Image (cartoon, rainbow, N blue to C red):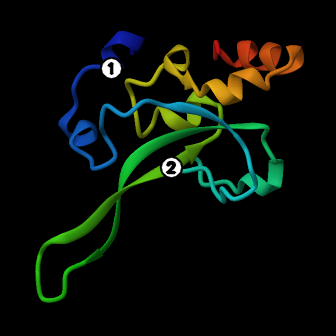
Amino acid sequence: MDDRESRHYDPKIHRKLHQNANPFVLRTYDGRMKNCRGCGAAFKDVRPQFVIAHQELYVYGRLKNSKRILTMQRDMFYHCDPDCIQPRHPYFDMCNIVTNPAVTRHLDESDIEHLHSLGIFP
């Protein structure tokens, strides 16, 4: 299957609650993030230096005696790996990641080389 074909609209994927136009943001790993939303692996097992955050709707319950669900926007975190992100976001591309200026200012040469090797261009 061609890469362009996989990015076409698929209602089974694109109507999910986590689909939105919010940017994917490079963040430093601070230890509070528990699991990768894509692969489910614990971040503490590997302790990545950087993670990718994406605000998505999170379902946290249902109103009592109602069909309405309670949702809120919440940051979800992923490894800096397209294989973790693309199953939930097939339109994702590593070069579209935005970086907070505070994170960019604290990058050293080795961080920049590592991010470039992943396809991220801060």
Q: Which mark is residue 76?
A: 2
Where does residue 12 sit, x and y in percent of width and height?
23, 41
Residue found 40% across the figure and 34% down from its top: 89
Residue 49's image quarter?
top right
**To which residue does mark 1 refer?**
7
**Crowd band around label 1 with a 10 angstrom C-alpha radius: few (<14), some (14–19), many (20+):** few
Which amino acid is tagged 1?
Arg
* Residue name at image x 50 percent, y 49 percent: 76
Horizontally, is 96 left or right of 120 in the view? Answer: left
Cα distance, mark 1 to mark 2? 21 Å
Q: In this view, which residue lies farthest toward the left?
A: 66
Compare marks 1 and 2 and give the one earlier in the sequence: 1
Whether residue 2 is situated above or below residue 70 in the rendered picture:
above
Q: What residue sits 25% from the left and 20% below the top?
A: 8
- 87 left or right of 109? left
Mark number, residue 103? none
